[in-house]
């Protein structure tokens, strides 16, 4: 029998339909792997009984020819999605034993198509981080680590690592400023952040509400398209979800890019851009050109303000979003305190990690009387300018190609200042601020053989075009075959 | 014209400047951002959705019914309805606030400036400006008496829609403030956007008050909280005005602060100073898009607004030929007005107005019942009026029948029948009786005829004595006049 854990979405669904294996066999195989090979610490927990029961139900449906679109497909879920009956903590001590009695809309959409819950993957606490090192459940190792232990990126580091290490065919992530794309780049996987509003945020623990968006992490572009197909859709329970039709993403992957126009923003050619990243970017341009696309230069003049803007807007929203974790209703409460105020202080001091506390403080500061206009209001104005930059650029091109991150994965414990860490998001936050769809697809390797991703940014609600471009890069880069040479 | 009350201090005269902030619970089926019920008095924590409890990942969705009610209320206050408004987060920690922020409207409220007319008695009115009306969610309730060690939280109220209605500082004494609060309550009840119950907390009032020498600039104001009746608001304002005058006259300055009114001691005391005031860090709620309202929606509600108290009062004066006072009393509450109108149809409206104001409303007042709780319905009272009108009973008997109906129930005609209260209007019977009285009392007749007209009453008394009061006094008067003349 083939190694089941190597299979992607289409291969799994084909195998199940052809009765090459059953959903139960598939889940048994994955559970075995999770029990024996969780050296990366990608998962924080899984539920063998639940997954097996779901697999049996799936097999029963298939036996009756009632199988659903994703029937039997195992999916790992970032610990930020509320899954009914499963511990959901956003990898924070403050929610350590929280078990929601409801199911997020995105996971619910997938389960309705017969997909099977495989387990919860690790992440930076409340999705705040770019290395997965702020998780309350310990660090996660990038599967590409050799002599030195590398971070998987963050915040969806557990999801990217799980997919890269064949611990799951697909994992769900969320992206606020790059949390799907950067770990996808670091781990050599595909990571797709859809347009803001494409997927419902209902039931996803909020970090920054105007930026958060769910998306898939997979080993192929088509797999991402196939999963996004069923994650997407209007949700009356999320006022910011978009009531517009969901196109056929799978078809989009194979559509031609001939005569399509790709924009290259010169503002992304920053001083700190490593030569190997620059080289992969140039290769990417070549591949697209060779496949019939036109390449033009575009201007995104406010790019340099995107990172500071993001680090005002996101913490501001987070400072309010995280106020509900106060020790009163659910989750962690400090053991000893003198009075109400002390209960709040102790609970939140002990319950939140350093990075989360830093961002709550930043957010509280930028919203404070006397600072609001200078920070929050100014940031909102810059955000509008960034949106306008993209609008202008998209008058001239169909998609924009950039590197996903300024470098490949760095070492665990690399002594970075918060600002240095925030620099990881420099190429991903502009699309987040503008609410645009963006995908990271492996382009090749750094000089020291770490995966490097290329990012395609599309027009709002035009995931189709970036899926088409990403498919071309996927084919041209031949990344999958190179894996064998490297590992 | 009525002049506002001027207070006399040690050093001279003082004028009050008052503005009111009213929190009115929106009458609608579900909460502002969730589908939970808003019914009052349910068991604690039985009307709480995951959203109201601020569970992780939950998102608010605006209740359009509450928006409609805010639009209607805005129209009733002659106010501008904004096509675009924004919900903001007001951040502070408290156990009754599960999200750690209240969703409210700060810079862009749904309703802008408006006004209403207050009535100050004797037909005197004054126009009071409205600054704004915005929608916001209510907090839960802390219960401190349920457990020896802990305070408990009831989230039934969490997320209930409120309209905060802010007046301009246009009121100059507690009478005006009282009239404003009564008028506003009357209006929201007329359009059914709030039930107006202050004792259940569905209408709450904060008062901003300062004092100044007449004609001078506004003084430093204090905000009074915890006011749950019109009476207490007026008392709180009075107390606070004198407190501030005393401070200024002693050469000190009033501190801007929030003060709590204690209705038992009738005093206000400091709750928090301006320096201790929270920095609420308002910012637009990213979970909610701006609220857009089309002109069409705005106009539809304007067209379909019911008749409001002022218009109804003017109509009552004209249509039923009522005095300003009577029309005003009848229209202060829509239910009272409706009650009157259903009875006035086909009857002498002035008589009906007079009767229900002096007897029926007085009785309700005496037993402290609202018109909804009245044991007597329109039809019962209508029957009673008809019995008076056709002479079956006298006005005096009617009051007796009314009291019987009110206390023990039953219909007027049954009570009249059972108690034998029917009035004798039969002219022949009364003429014979009167003839006999005249014959038996020739001396008195002489006296009367020689000019002692006061004796007329004595003759009426005799007839009433003979009939145990059942004689129709109108008929008796007529016959007596005729018979005694001869």
Image (cartoon, coloured by chain):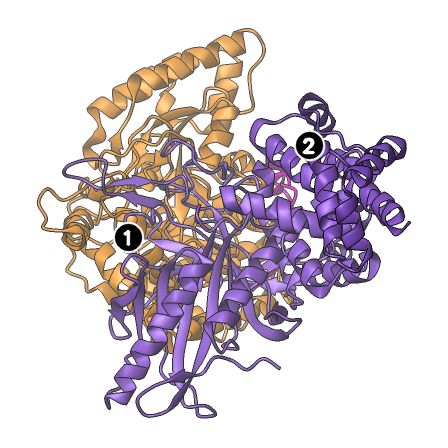
Circle 1: element type: loop
Neighbourhood count class around disc 2 (C-alpha, 10 Å): few under 14, some 14–19, many 20 upward = few
User: Quick one: B414 or A432, which is closer to the camera?
Assistant: B414
Percent x, y of residue A279: 39, 61
The subunit carrying tag 2 is: B
Instruction: Examine the image and state in which quarter residue B49 appears.
Output: top left
Comes first in the chain, label 2 or label 1: 1
Q: Nearer the viewer, residue B344 or A248?
A: B344
10 Å crowding of disc 1: few (<14), some (14-19), many (20+): some
Residue B118 in percent (x, y) is at 60, 69
Judge left or right: residue A246 versus residue A443.
Answer: right
Question: Which is nearer the eye, A282 or A428?
Answer: A428
What residue span does the magenta drawing correspond to? Answer: A244-264
Residue A49, by quadrant, is: top left
- The residue at the far front in this view is B443
Q: Quickly name the residue at label 2.
A: B468
Q: Position of residue A288 (x, y in %)?
A: 55, 55
Q: Is residue B152 magenta?
A: no
Snapshot quadrant of residue B85: bottom right
In the drawing, what numbered circle is on residue B268? Answer: none
Q: Which residue is mark 1?
A: B94
The reply to whether callout 2 and callout 1 are in contact (CB within 8 Å) is no
In this rendering, would A124 be left or right of A13?
Answer: left
* Residue at (34% x, 73% y) in the render: B240
Specify the chain shown as purple: B
Question: Does the magenta segment cover residue A255?
Answer: yes
Q: Residue B480 in the image: x percent, y percent?
A: 83, 45
Separation of marks 2 and 1 at Cα, in angstroms: 71 Å
Work out whether B124 lies above or below B404: below
Letter of the chain shown orange in the rendering: A
């Amino acid at each position: 029998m083939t190694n089941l854990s190597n299979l992607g979405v289409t291969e799994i669904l084909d195998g199940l339909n052809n009765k090459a294996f059953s959903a139960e066999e598939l889940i048994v195989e994955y559970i075995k792997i999770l029990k024996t090979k969780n050296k990366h610490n990608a998962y924080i927990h899984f539920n063998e009984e639940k997954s097996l029961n779901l697999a049996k139900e799936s097999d029963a449906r298939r036996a009756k020819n009632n199988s659903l679109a994703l029937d039997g497909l195992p999916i790992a879920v970032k610990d930020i999605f509320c899954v009914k009956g499963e511990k959901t903590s956003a990898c924070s001590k403050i929610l350590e034993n929280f078990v929601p009695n409801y199911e997020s809309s995105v996971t619910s959409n997938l389960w309705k198509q017969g997909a099977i819950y495989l387990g919860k993957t690790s992440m930076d606490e409340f999705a705040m981080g770019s290395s997965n090192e702020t998780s309350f459940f310990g660090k996660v190792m990038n599967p590409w680590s050799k002599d030195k232990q590398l971070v998987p990126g963050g915040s969806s580091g557990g999801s990217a690592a799980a997919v890269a290490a064949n611990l799951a065919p697909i994992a769900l992530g969320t992206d606020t400023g790059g949390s799907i794309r950067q770990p996808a780049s670091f781990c050599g996987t595909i990571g797709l952040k859809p347009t803001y509003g494409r997927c419902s945020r209902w039931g996803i623990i909020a970090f920054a509400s105007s930026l958060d968006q769910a998306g898939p992490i997979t080993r192929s572009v088509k797999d991402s398209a196939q999963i996004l197909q069923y994650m997407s859709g209007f949700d009356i329970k999320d006022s910011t979800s978009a009531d517009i039709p969901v196109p056929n993403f799978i078809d989009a992957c194979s559509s031609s890019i001939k005569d399509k126009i790709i924009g290259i923003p010169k503002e992304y050619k920053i001083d700190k851009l490593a030569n190997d990243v620059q080289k992969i970017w140039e290769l990417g341009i070549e591949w697209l050109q060779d496949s019939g696309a036109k390449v033009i230069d575009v201007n995104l003049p406010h790019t340099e303000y995107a990172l500071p803007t993001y680090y005002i807007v996101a913490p501001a929203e987070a400072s309010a979003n995280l106020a509900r974790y106060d020790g009163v209703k659910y989750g962690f409460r400090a053991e000893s305190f003198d009075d109400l105020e002390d209960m709040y202080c102790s609970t939140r001091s002990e319950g939140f990690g350093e990075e989360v506390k830093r961002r709550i403080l930043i957010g509280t500061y930028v919203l404070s009387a006397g600072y609001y206009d200078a920070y929050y209001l100014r940031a909102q104005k810059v955000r509008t300018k960034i949106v306008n930059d993209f609008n202008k650029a998209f008058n001239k091109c169909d998609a924009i190609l950039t590197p996903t991150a300024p470098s490949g994965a760095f070492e665990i414990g690399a002594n970075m200042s918060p600002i240095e860490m925030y620099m990881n998001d420099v190429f991903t936050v502009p699309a987040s601020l503008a609410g645009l769809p963006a995908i990271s697809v492996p382009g090749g390797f750094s000089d020291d053989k770490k995966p490097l991703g290329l990012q395609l940014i599309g027009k709002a609600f035009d995931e189709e075009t970036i899926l088409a471009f990403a498919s071309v890069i996927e084919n041209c880069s031949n990344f999958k075959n190179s894996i064998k040479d490297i590992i | 014209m009525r002049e506002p009350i001027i207070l006399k201090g040690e050093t001279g005269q003082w004028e009050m400047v008052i503005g009111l902030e009213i929190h009115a619970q929106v009458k609608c089926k579900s909460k502002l951002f969730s589908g939970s019920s808003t019914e009052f008095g349910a068991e604690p924590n039985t009307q709480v959705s995951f959203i109201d409890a601020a569970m992780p990942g939950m998102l608010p969705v605006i209740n359009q019914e509450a928006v409609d009610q805010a639009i209607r209320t805005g129209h009733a206050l002659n106010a501008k309805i904004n096509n675009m408004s924004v919900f903001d987060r007001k951040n502070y920690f408290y156990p009754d606030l599960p999200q750690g922020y209240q969703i409210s409207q700060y810079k862009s409220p749904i309703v802008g400036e408006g006004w209403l007319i207050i009535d100050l008695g004797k037909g005197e009115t004054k126009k009071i400006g409205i600054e704004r009306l915005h929608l916001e969610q209510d907090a839960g309730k802390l219960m401190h008496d349920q457990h020896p060690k802990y305070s408990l939280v009831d989230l039934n109220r969490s997320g209930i829609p409120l309209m905060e209605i802010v007046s301009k500082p246009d009121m100059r004494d507690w009478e005006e403030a009282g009239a404003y609060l009564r008028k506003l309550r009357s209006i929201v009840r007329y359009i059914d956007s709030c039930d107006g119950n202050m004792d259940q907390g569905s209408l709450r009032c904060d008062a901003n008050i300062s004092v100044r020498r007449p004609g001078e600039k506004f003084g430093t104001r204090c905000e009074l909280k915890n006011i749950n009746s019109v009476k207490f608001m007026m008392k709180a304002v009075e107390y606070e005005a004198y407190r501030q005058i005393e401070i200024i006259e002693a050469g000190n300055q009033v501190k801007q602060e929030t003060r709590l009114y204690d209705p038992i001691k009738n005093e206000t005391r400091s709750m928090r100073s301006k320096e201790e005031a929270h920095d609420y860090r308002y910012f637009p709620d990213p979970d909610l898009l701006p609220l857009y309202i089309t002109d069409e929606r705005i106009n539809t509600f304007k067209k379909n607004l019911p008749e409001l108290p002022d218009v109804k009062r003017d109509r009552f004066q004209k249509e039923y030929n009522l005095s300003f006072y009577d029309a005003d009393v009848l229209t202060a509450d829509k239910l009272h007005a409706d009650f009157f109108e259903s009875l006035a149809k086909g009857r002498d409206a002035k008589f009906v107005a007079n009767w229900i104001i002096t007897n029926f409303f007085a009785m309700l007042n005496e037993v402290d019942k609202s018109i909804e709780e009245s044991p007597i319905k329109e039809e019962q009272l209508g029957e009673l009026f008809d019995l008076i009108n056709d002479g079956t009973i006298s006005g005096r008997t009617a009051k007796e029948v009314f009291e019987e109906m009110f206390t023990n129930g039953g219909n007027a005609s049954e009570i009249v029948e059972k108690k034998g209260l029917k009035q004798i209007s039969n002219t022949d019977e009364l003429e014979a009786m009167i003839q006999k009285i005249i014959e038996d009392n020739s001396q008195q007749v002489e006296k009367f005829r020689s000019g002692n007209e006061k004796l007329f009453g004595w003759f009426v008394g005799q007839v009433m004595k003979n009939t145990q009061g059942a004689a129709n006094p109108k008929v008796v008067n007529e016959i007596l006049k005729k018979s005694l003349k001869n």
